[in-house]
Amino acid sequence: MKQSLLKLLAVLFAFALIAAACGDDDDDASEDTGSEETDEGESSDGDMAEGDVDFGGAEVTITGSERDDPSVAAINDALNEHFEPLGLTVTFAGDADWEANINTQVQGGNPPDISLFPQPGKLADFARAGDIVPLTDEVVAAIDEYWAPGLSSVVNVDGEQYGVPVKSDLKGIVFYKPARFEADGYEVPTTYDDFVALVDEMAAAGGSKPLCVGIESGTATGWMFTDWVEDMMLRLHGGDVYDQWISNEVKFDDPRVIEAMQAVKDLWTEENVFAAGGTISATNFGAPVAEALAADDCYMVRHSNFFAGLFPEGTVFADGSEDAIDVFYFPDINGDGPVLSAGNFATAFNDRPETMAVLEYMATADYAQSRQAKQSAELDGNLSGFLSAAKGQDPSVYQPLEQQFLDILSSADFVRFDGGDLMPADVGSGSFWSEGTALTNGDITAEEAGANIQATWPE
Amino acid sequence: MSSTSSLSPGIASDAPEAALGRTGRWYAFIRSIPTWIVWLIVIVWSIPSLGLFVNSWRTRDAQTSTGWWAVNVDELTFDNYDQIFSARNSIWDSLANSFAIALPATIIPIAFAAFAAYGFAWIDFKGRKGLFIATVSLLAIPLQVALIPLLQLYVGGAKWTLPLLDKTITLVPDFDLAGETTAVWLTHTGFAMPFAIFLLHNYISSLPKDLFEAARIDGADHFTIFWRLVLPLSVPVLAAFGIFQFLWTWNDYLIANTMVGSNPDAHPTTILIANLAGDFGRNEHILPAAAFVQAFIPLVAFFALQRFFVRGMLAGSVKG
Amino acid sequence: MTSLGHRHYGVGVPKFFWSHIWGEVLETKQDGGTAVETAATPQPNSWFATQSLKARVLLIVGAVTTLAFMIFSAKIRSTIVTVVVAVAVCAGIWIGANLLFDQSRERWQRFQSLVFAVLGAVVGIIIHGNGLTLGSEGGFFSWILGPLVGGLAFGALGYFLAGTEDAQQRLTVSVAGMAVVGLGIGLLLREQYQPGVDWVATIVYTLVFAGIGAGLRVLTNRPWQSGVYLGATLGWLLGFWAGADVGDGNVGTAILGAVVPAVLVGIHVGQTRNPDYAGRVQLDQTSRAWIFLGPGLLFIMVMLVIPAIRTAYLSLLDRDSESFVWFDNYKATFTDKASWDASNWTNMFTSWPFLIGVAVLVIAALIGFRQKELTGRAVELGNPTVVPLIAGFLFVCFGVFTAMRGTIINNLWWVVAVTFFSTAIGLAVAVLADGRGGEKIAKSIIFMPMALSLVGASIIWRFVYQTRDISKEQTGIANALWIGLGKLSTGSGIPTILGMVVLGIIVAVCASFMGQSLVRRAYGRAAVPGIALIFFGWIFIRYTQIIGGGIGGFKTNANGETVGETIVFVQESPYNNFWLMVILIWIQVGFSMVILSAAIKAVPTELIEAAQIDGATDSQVFWRITLPQIAPTIVVVVTTLIVLVMKVFDIVKVVTNGQFGTQVLANDMFQQAFNNLNIGRGAALAMLIFLSVLPVMVFNIRRMQEEV
């Protein structure tokens, strides 16, 4: 009898303890925010005198697909550092299922104030459906001041600007270890033919594999394949064909597209690729690939700038030391030097003054460098993986390698945006991914993949 | 499930062990095969969880380079758990949110479903059978279909525009519940209803009829019978459904993510953990620990109350 | 209340509840005995007083601490407040309604006055509480005054009507009374609410609603007149008041707006009669049904029925829900290659599962013929045909499912495999563990996955299925074992030989069992060891490289060396589907085991003892007695699993998101509706899921009801 009573009590206590822990924490949290508020209250007097805006405790919520801890922390901190003195609380929530949730929330009439769209194509759909609002003149002015037109015009829909570029990605760069190249007698290729020759040479040597590739990305598995295909489309057929491809004037079953997919498939042979996860499509595109390159399992990784943030702690970049990692430009074919970019665009779901104020700030170089500084601090000074092409940032917040990325981005005159992100979701974040994965696995041929993807293009 | 069953209906063990010697030993060996099979299944069943549990205490390097069965003492670390408990969005807050969702979502459906189950079981009215079948058939609806309409209801209420006239009548006012835990538990309450009615009805309708007749002869009305007789007698099934519903709501990701996904202050543990992993595979190593933290409460509740679970679930499915 | 309560069923609710819990908790620990009895026997005093002092102190401390901690957490506190208020209000209304209808049989006059009073109070709240009438700005007081006046007025009317049977008198009083009420409301209405009338709207609405009311009455075989009155009342209210420009009218229009509907209601009420006793019982019964069902049905209506109807409607519209495409969405689903691809059906005839299945079915047919000669029936529970029949069917299904691909095929595969294996393994454990040592521990461990979230389970299995490059050590146990087996099989050291010996012994044991049974002409008993023999024999042959070159994860590379080869479990189609199903099977076996185990324990002992006395073996007892006895329970488990599996979503979404040929209907629906915003297609898929589960559901319920 007593024993059983004790047993039940133990269960009760377990619940009580948990409740207590929650309770304590809750109280702490409220005390914390309380004290912060008073602190800010004192300092805000000064700010008020300068800024003369006070949002009187308003709140702005932002959602986005970035959910890595350092990114979420940096976005929140950068925004709140600026807005808290002005009486505005900004919350950024990373969402593992953003692609679906933003649709649900809009349909349900409950969107956040701002959302960060990685896909201009989706943003344009929302704009045409009237779900998002055009930016005010002040925000547009800020964009014009800080951003090159080439990078912001991609979210200009029917003459209205809908998105603020807040993050820039540079694709089509190859990570490698210069010291290893030197030691093994390889040279950085300058043409695509050289690149293929180099890969063959490395594969024949029988040591490390030439390439590390991974395209696994949870529910988004396959996007890495689309990146490669886009790079190939640009390099093989130039900008015009690329644009027609995105608008489906050049169909997916067009021989030119198939050629690009086949080119990727031809590189991804078992001899050429080290896949840390057994096969390419089972290998996560991020940390496992970076670790493999750092551990000399392969010579090269074609990736994007943010890849630099995924290396193990203590990795050094571009400083000439033995283990340092550097990048070279994924060589072009026709000598026109195309650059593939991507990025996030902050979009407003309402035109409340505080929403627009946040967007205006997010367009500035100030925000970009603040986030960059915080994000690399979160990672103890390692490369953050974040990049912003906003003009007028203090260069010292970026490390030499990141400055290299920025140079490529800002000096390029043949820039195209990630094609998959511009296509309708059925394709751009649907069949293009899944058929690409199937092609990678060798389940289907490039022709079949092209035909299958084309079949899902919505009329 | 009483422990009184000494009988062995299956290929069980009450063989005469009289015949000893070589054949006897051979016979005993054959007799023990079923036991070995059971324990083999038990081992296979526990290996996945065991592996995850071991890995949750190992360093990142150890997890990514060797299997959990190769564990050695140097690799053990508390860092994974530490990382979860010190995450930016506090796990304690999310536990509180999970409670704030799971408790009402468990209690309220029990009450409503008990009323309805009694109504279906013991009150005679026209179309009872049809209505019951219709109600329980709704179990077949995939709950995803209701997410958008419900979100619209929570955000904008329900309005009816009168034809011909330029007027709208508010049927349900706009409570602006999206982003609140209330929206989550209300949704769970609705979705749980068909199953709860089904389960409780099975049990309540199998209570002995004489009991009700005696009570009726005494002049008791439905309310008294329900309150004094049915409710006390139904405790096992109420508890069984309670556990079921608690586990379900505690473990739910989809509904919570739809309703409160954009408000980090209201995230329950499932969402917190889904986001913890990050999107670059950098934090995979804390997933095992996170999964165990998330499963702790349901496991405690479950093991503490599993006897009820069994008894209540059996209602109606087992005769005799 | 009556004298029922404590006299006959002397179980105060809390006491009963707790004693029940003690009974349960104790049962787990002790083998019956005194403690259970003391706890389970209702005590005359309160349960709490019967506990030992120490227990009482502990209990109080525990409760107080729990409460205290809960109060400290703001979030839990606010939730508790919300829930308590919500529950209290609902309970108040619900209990009040019950108490009210308790009066209806015996005290009709009181009942009717109270019902009228409540209606009046509601009208009072609506009109006065909203500040529509004069004298209602007094805050709290005005919330009391309106309902009070309304309640009294209506209550008096109800009281009078219940007291007289004279039709003429009833009509007069009712109409006059209601007219006075309407007049009062009209006179008291504030100036800014006096309506300017839109006659067209008023007349149209009144006529339309009167027609609807009459129609409804006629349809339900009741006189149409009262329908006209009630319909006209509603129509007038809507048309007159909603159509009006509020504030443009005068006292006259206000009176007109209030008196007309009031009089209409008055006519309706005046024409009714007081029900006789049978009618009152009927009323009690019907209204009580709605009181009990109401709260639950309300939730079901709002959360399930309306969304479901909306979904059915949307499934007929195009992707943006703008124009009707009728059944195009359904057609598209069935013609899409992704949901139904039979182009490779010829592969079926070369697939191993199919060939094995056909072979086993042939054996089943042979046995069936023999059985027919012997007993007159080819197939019957417990005869030797059953096992090969089921096994053959399963293999053939797998053959078909691996040759034809697509979402619908995948769903079928899930249904067949998960339902079969969950039930079969659950049954096996329930039977084999029954009455043996450690039964509880074994069952608890197998049951445990039920407590995990599907997302958590998917994480667990992702680690099991993990794959790494063959140059590295494997971290997933599945691949580690597979490659280990390969190494063992292709190696030549002592472990390899040991493995060979162990396998040999297993094969020999199976063979001897089968041989013994065959010699005794007990063909039924030979089935299980026979199938085991085929399985282990095949492994043995492959392992010892008698046929083929070894078994497990290995391959010969270009240089002729033997190296490991991994399986990427979640990606290698079509069997990756099965590896996903394993996750759900892992979770669901516990469910079927528990239910079947209880069913087995409920089989009457006399039956089994009688059979044993007749010399039946254990397996005969199982096939001939236990299985038929628990067959209804198996049907319940199977149907429950089918419903669950058709809606499977989380596992596929988390592990593959439908890639690698693992798409299922529920995930496809989610992707179409939520990711691609193809609302029409998503809705059509949802309807397909609903329609395919519906027959199973209805079958299940009907069967259940027949039993009760």
Image (cartoon, rainbow, N blue to C red):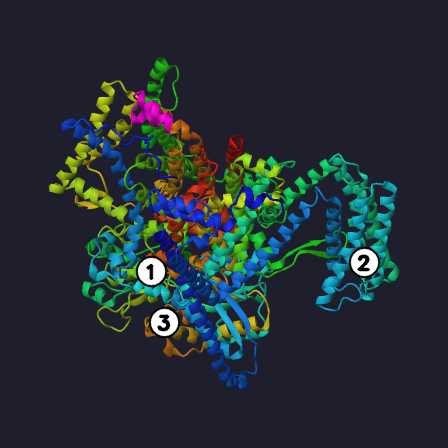
- Residue C479: mark in rendering: none
Chain under disc 1: B
Q: What residue span does the magenta drawing correspond to? A: C605-623
Q: Amino acid at mark 3?
A: Glu
Q: Nearer the viewer, residue C656 or A329?
A: C656
Q: Quick one: SS at disc 1?
A: helix
Task: Return the residue at label 2.
Answer: C244
Give the prevailing secondary structure in the magenta stretch: helix
Residue A266 % position (x, y) = 32, 50
Chain under disc 3: A
Tell me where residue C102 sits by quadrant: top right
Chain under disc 2: C
- In the image, is C173 to the left or to the right of B221? right
Residue C176 % position (x, y) = 87, 51
Residue B210 among magenta residues = no
- For residue C613, above or below residue B96: above
Q: Quick one: SS at disc 2?
A: loop
Same chain for the residues under marks 2 and 1 in the image:
no
Q: Amino acid at mark 2?
A: Ala
Task: Return the residue at label 3.
Answer: A378
Q: Nearer the viewer, mark 1 or mark 3?
A: 1
Q: Amino acid at mark 1?
A: Ile
How far is disc 2 from disc 3 in space, using C-alphas? Answer: 63 Å
Q: Quick one: SS at disc 3?
A: helix
Task: Return the residue at label 1.
Answer: B286
- In the image, is C703 to the left or to the right of B294? right
Residue B18 % position (x, y) = 19, 27
Q: How many marks?
A: 3
